[in-house]
Amino acid sequence: MKTKQLNNEHARRAAIFRRAVKYAVCILIALIMLFPMYWMFTTSFKTPMNVAKFPPQWWPNPWTLENYVEIFTQRPFLKYLWNSLYTAALTTAGVVLFSSLAGDAFAKIKFRGSSILFMIILCGMMMPVEVTIIPIYTALAALGLADNHLGIIVVPVFGYCGAFGTFLMRQNFLTVPSELVQAAKLDGASQPRIFLRIMMPMAVSSISTLVIWTFLQSWNNFLLPLVLLSSSDHFTLPLGISLLSNESGMRWELVMAAATFSSVPILIVFYMCQNKFMASLSMSGMKG
């Protein structure tokens, strides 16, 4: 009896130790991942002299709002912010719309050559944008969309974001029972009604995932606007942040202030979609 109690005590202590180690590792990883955000936030309140201090200043002393005042009053930051905001919103809406339609067609509508066409779309998703940037620019320049926001919206919708979205939505629609669709058809439901009333409500978690991913991709897109846009009035936020420099070099305090403020829309989008996004992760874990 005494030996059994000792074994139970050792097992309990071992379990507590393993749990403590697991939590310690998780906390360490979280601190490592959060440190760049902490550094970005604190640097945005530092003076130019304190930014370049060595050893580095871990806490702003003194705190200053001059960096935020400068990017909003002396720089066209709000113009860059608006350009990024509405192009990212339209890109996200376009990707969700066309990817949902294409995913439904590939999952539930049988037509000749669907498998080959889907493989071609997957090959387009695997091809880096850097490889196709010159043909993209040539095609858009011929259409008069080289220095136009429509160009940086159309390319992701019908390019890499659209390809990934089509793949994601097709995989989700494949989980919808075909018997449910056939029952709706027997009740006289048309294909658009089946898509809107049955398929889309059952894909809310995947749509939330696609919204977060597409918005993030469009918001952080630097290469495509850099190649396509030449007028400063059309610049998006990543291009505008790259211009925060003077004759002495990059103004890192301004860069960090702009980056801190520009992260707010991403956090808002994630907050709005986080419940369905986490649900999709839990469901994928259950399927695995």
Image: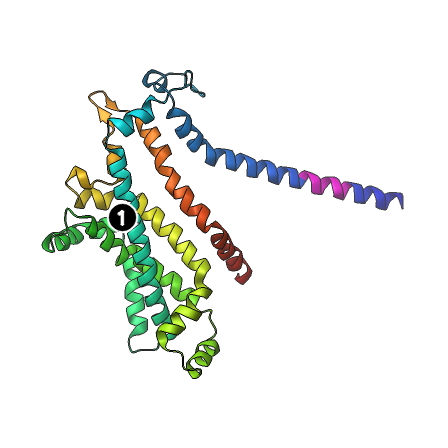
Which segment did they paint magenta? 10-17
Residue at (32% x, 32% y) in the render: 258
Disc 1: which residue: 87
Question: Which residue corresponds to the image point at 29% horizontal and 55% vertical from the top-left?
Answer: 160
Q: Which amino acid does label 1 sit on?
A: Thr
Q: Is residue 157 above or below residue 18?
A: below
Residue 142 position by quadrant: bottom left
Q: How is the image coloured?
A: rainbow
Front-lying residue, 288 or 147 = 147
16 falls in the magenta region: yes
Residue 56 location (% of width, % of height): 41, 19
Q: Position of residue 28 (x, y in %)?
A: 54, 34
Give left or right: position of 244 versus 173.
left
- Secondary structure found at label 1: helix
Q: Residue furthest right?
A: 1
Using the rendered view, name the quadrant where residue 27 is placed: top right
